[in-house]
Amino acid sequence: MEETNAQNKVVEEVHDIADNQNMQIGKYMTFKSGNEYFGLEIQYVIEIIQLQAITLIPETEDYIRGIINLRGKVIPVIDVRLRFKQKPFEYNDRTCIIVINVKSTVVGLIVEKIAEVVEIKKENILPPPKIGHTEKIQNKYVYGIGKVGDSVKLLLDPDKLLNDEDLTVLEQVNDINNEEE
């Protein structure tokens, strides 16, 4: 119950920040995926919603879970864990969808748990390490490591979460929305 209240507070904070562009600078929406915490620049975040019924789209990548109807708009949703080649998880009451705008395409990101909104100054953002195998899947989506107190957040580049083939499928869904307006 306490965790749900904390998550609701974060959702309210995101909505407040989204309404004021000056407040967005240096702010990141953080969420958990697997054992890691990731951050998205708040400017990409439109809203955070509870998980809802998902309609599957045949013959798409496994991480594209399908589409949802959000107030009359059809929005494709991606499971972040599957995108990062992590083990799938069972959705529960903390599972949320972060609705973002990437390259003028609205997409939902299914995440295990919303963490918090944090401010990370430029001087506290380091480039991702280049040790070991550069084929580490999630590292190609990470543009920086944000230091927050004693912890770090992997900062995501939303543009890289979607490849060109994904964008084609997602743009088709967006075209359907635009025709209906």
Image: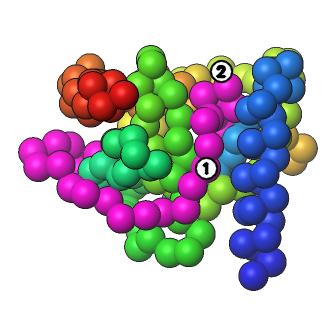
Residue at (62% x, 43% y) in the render: 47
> Which of the 4 quarters of the picture holds residue 149?
top right
Q: Residue lying at the far front in this picture: please name it.
A: 181
Q: Is residue 148 left or right of residue 127?
A: right
Camera-side mark, 2 or 1: 1
Task: Name the one closer to the observer, 26 or 152.
Answer: 26
**Type of amino acid at the residue the image marks with label 2:** Pro
Label ID, residue 127 = 2
x and y percentages locating residue 70 in the rendered image = 44, 49
Task: Name the one closer to the observer, 51 or 61.
Answer: 51
Q: Residue lying at the far left in this picture: please name it.
A: 59
Q: Which residue is mark 1?
A: 48
Q: Which residues are magenta?
A: 38-64
> Which of the 4 quarters of the picture holds residue 146?
top right
x and y percentages locating residue 103 in the rendered image = 44, 17
Check disc 1: other Cα within 10 Å, few if <14, some if 14-19, many if 20+.
many
Q: Is residue 134 left or right of residue 44?
A: left
Q: Is residue 83 left or right of residue 98?
A: left
